[in-house]
Amino acid sequence: MTIPQADRDFFKFNAVYFEQARMGFLHGMPQATLAHMEHMYRTHLDPRFVLTAWCSACVVDMMVRLSRLWESVQAADEAHALALQAAIPPAYVPEVISADLRPEPVATEVSARHVDKRPKSRRGRPKKQA
């Protein structure tokens, strides 16, 4: 199933509502988003679908079905990407690098802070001397 990029972006942007629907509730979904979700359902799943917007169970059911559609699209995209990756031959990598091409080791200086072995001073209030 091919879904246009604009619809994919809309699904990705509103993925939080899919998570909420899987948990059984929807909180804070704007009416325009709900109307667009209904349009997406009609476009990609069932052209004869009619949503009863005041029925929360109906809205959650629609969202769960759309989330399954979105998951299947993502899985198909991942499978397609893996197939493309397997079809492309790996770049040539030489087996052995000759000694004259290896980088020379770089001498590093150790700071005085790391060499100093003096005990650290204690923090806080100093003890009273008797």
Image: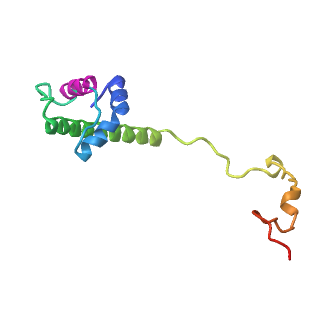
Residue 29 drawn in magenta: no
In front of the other: 80 or 37: 37
Answer whether residue 73 is visible to the viewer in this image: no
The C terminus is located in which quarter? bottom right
Kindly identify the residue that appears in the image at 23 percent across and 36 percent down: 63
Residue found 23% across the figure and 42% down from its top? 25
- On the image, the x and y values in percent for residue 1 come to 26, 31
Instruction: Point out the residue furthest to the bottom here.
Output: 130
Regarding residue 4, the answer to whether it shows in the image is yes
**Residue 36 falls in image quadrant:** top left
Instruction: Give left or right: position of 124 versus 41.
Output: right
Which residue is located at x 85 percent, y 58 percent? 113
Residue 102 at x, y = what percent? 79, 49
Residue 46 is drawn in which quadrant?
top left
Q: What sort of colour scheme is used for the picture?
A: rainbow
**Most frequent secondary structure within the magenta stretch:** helix
* Foreground residue among 41 and 111: 111
Residue 51's quadrant in the figure? top left
- Give the number of callouts: 0
x then y, percent, for residue 97: 74, 50
Q: Give the x, y percent position of residue 43.
A: 21, 24
Residue closer to the observer: 24 or 1: 24
Nearer the observer, 41 or 23: 23
Placement of 62 over or under 33, stated as above or below: below
Tell me which segment is drawn in magenta.
31-43
Above-or-below relation of 42 to 20? above
